[in-house]
Image (cartoon, grey):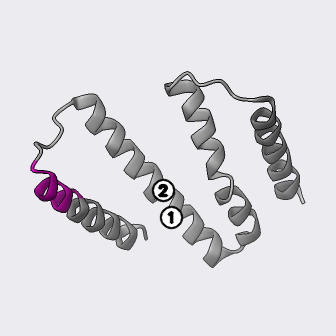
Amino acid sequence: QPWPIVGARLTTALGLLAVLAVMRRAPLPTDRVGISLIGATGLFEVAANCGYLSASTHGQLAVAAVLVSMYPISTVVLARLVLDERMTRLQVAGVVGAIAAAGLITRG
């Protein structure tokens, strides 16, 4: 049941947004693309937490822990795709190595 996670994320996110809006006295964003991206990020985060919760209650926690620990890869890939940053050879090697390791771990 994802509802406790959804409720916790909504109250935390909305509370933080309200505090920041009051502190900065800035108008809330009205850009549809920005709001859509924020919503999609929240949905993915809730889905990831639900997956981790499911793995911890139904087994396969070791696999889930390894996959969760790979979240920095998404930052590097998004920086490449969104900001057009170049990845160094060391970063490429790290991403490839982490994905290969995760595949080997999940395979057993």
Judge whether 4 appears above or below 102 on screen.
Answer: below
Q: How many neighbours does mark 1 have within 10 angstroms: few (below 14), some (14-19), or many (20 or more)?
A: some
Three-letter residue code for mark 1: Cys
Q: Furthest-bottom residue in view?
A: 57
Indicate whether residue 48 is drawn in magenta: no
Start-end of magenta stretch: 17-25
What percent of the width, then of the height, locates residue 89? 80, 29
Q: Which residue is mark 1?
A: 50
What percent of the width, then of the height, locates residue 84? 55, 21
Rendered-image quadrant of the C terminus: bottom right
Indicate whether residue 24 is drawn in magenta: yes
Residue visible at 80% across and 52% down in the picture: 102
Secondary structure found at label 1: helix
What percent of the width, then of the height, locates residue 30? 16, 34
Rendered-image quadrant of the N terminus: bottom left
Mark pair 2, 1: CA separation:
5 Å
32 relative to 101 in the view: left or right: left
Image quadrant assignment for residue 17:
bottom left
Judge whether 75 appears above or below 88 on screen.
Answer: below
Q: Which mark is residue 47?
A: 2
Image quadrant assignment for residue 65:
bottom right
Q: Furthest-front residue in view?
A: 24
Count every numbered label the image shows and give the total: 2
